[in-house]
Amino acid sequence: MAAPANSGILSLARGALRAPIPHELRGDLGMSVLILALFLLQVFTGILLSLYYQPSPEAVSESMQFIMRDVSWGWLLRGLHHWVSSGLILVCCLHLARALWGARYRGREWYWYLGALVMVLVVVLSFTGELLVWDNQAYWVVREFLADIETIPFIGRGVADVVRGGSEVNASTLSRTWTAHALFAPWLVWMLLMSNLALIVRDMRRAWAGGA
Amino acid sequence: MIVFERGAKPEQVQAVEEELRAQGVETRRVRAAGKPVLHVLCGRVASPGKVFTHDAVEGIVATSGPRIRREGHRFYPYHALQWFAIWIVVVAVLVLLAGQLPPGIGIAIDLRTPPSEVVVPWYGRAATGFLALFPQSLSWLAWTVMVAVLALFVALPRLDRKADRPRLVVVGAVAALLFAIGWLAVGGAA
C-alpha cells in the first residue's frame, strides 16, 4: 500500500488511520500510545490540580485539604494523578522489558535510548510529585534523599545545593521541586514521546514503501 | 477477488467461475467500480496462472492471508477498538484505586522529629537499599556501581549487537540484575 500523500494534516491523519500497521510495529505502537495516553491523563489531572495547589510551605497543607474535601471530584483527580504516576512507571518498565525479552533493541538503538530516558524522567516526575505534598513524611524523605545525593563524589554537594536552593530544605526547595514537576520534566517527556512516535511513523512508512 | 476488465461479458465471467468450481472453489458475482468481480467465498485458488489465461481477467487481489500477514491490520477499526477496550479497563482500574486507596495527607512538618519510619517511594527503594549497604566512607563505591549499572543498561544496544547471540544470555543477565535489585529493594525497605 502506498504511503498517504502529504496534502494537509487532515489527509495525513486520515491516511494514518486507514493505513495498515505492520505486525512488527504493532506492539511498539500500542505500548507507546498507552504511555502517551497515561501521560496526557497526568497532564490533564495535573493542570486541574494546579488550579488549587499553592506551592508555598504555609499554604500547601491547606490547599491539599481543600482539594480533597471541597473541590468537586478533587479526591478523584488527586487519586488518579497519584496512581497514574505509578502506572506510568510500571508501563515504561513493561515496555523496556518487552524490548529486552525480544532483543528488539538490536538495530533499533534510538527506540531503546528514548525509552530509557522517558523511564528516568517519569521517575523524576513521580518523585517530585510525592514531595509536593510537603508533609512530615515528604520533608524527611527529601532530607534523606539529599543527604544521599551529597555522598556522590565531587559533584554531590553542588547538586544537592542546586536542588535545595541553599544549605537547608525550605520554601526554595519546594519552589524548585514544583518548577521541575510542573514545567521542565513534563515538556521533556512530551518531546521524547513525540520523538518516539515519529520514529514509529518513519518505520511504518518504510514498511509501506517495502523498505527495511 | 478476481477482477475482470470493464466490459467483460457474462459468459467470460461464467467460464472462470466454472473453472474455479471444478477446483472446489466457491465464488459469488459482484460488481466493483463498474467491473465484474468474483469474490472467493471458500477454497483456495490453486493455480492463479490458469485464471490469467482468460483474456477478460484483469487481476487477482488477495484480501486475506499472506497480504494481511505482511501488511498488518488497519488502525481503524481493528487496533482502535482493541486499544479502546484496553484503555477503558486501565482507566477503570485507576479510578477504582483512586477511590479505594486514596493518597493521604500526612501531619505537618516537624523539623526536629522525623517520622518513626521514613517511607521512600517504591521505585526508589532499590537505590536507597543499595546505598544503605555501604558505610559512609565507601559511598563513592556505591554511587560508582549504580552509575555503571545504569550506563550499561542504557548502552545495551551498543553492547549487544550480534544478531546471532542467544537472547536468553542477555535476558538472563538482566533478570539476575533485576532480581538483585528487587532483593535490595526488599532488604533496603526492611
Image (cartoon, helix red, strand yellow):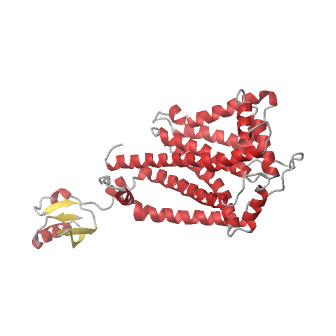
Please state the horizontal and vertical placement of residue A120, each as a whole percent of the image: 61, 43
Asked if residue A74 shows in the view, the reply is: yes
Q: In this view, does B164 lie to the left or right of A181?
A: left
At which x and y percent is residue B183?
73, 43
Is residue A14 or residue B57 the one in the foreground?
Answer: A14
Q: Nearer the viewer, residue B1 or A40?
A: A40
| Relative side of A29 to A77, left or right | left
* Quadrant containing the N terminus of chain B in the rendered view: bottom left
Q: Which of B173 and B21 is in front in this view?
A: B173
In this view, the residue in front, A137 or B22, is A137
Above or below B55: residue B116: above
Classify residue A87 as left or right of residue B130.
Answer: left
Camera sees residue B189: no
Image-quadrant location for residue B52: bottom left
Residue sitting at 89 percent across and 47 percent down? Answer: B113
Q: Residue at x 67, y 42 (%)?
A: B179
User: Residue at left 14%, top 71%?
Assistant: B14
**Where residue B19 appears, x then y in whole percent?**
16, 67
Residue furthest right in the image = B112
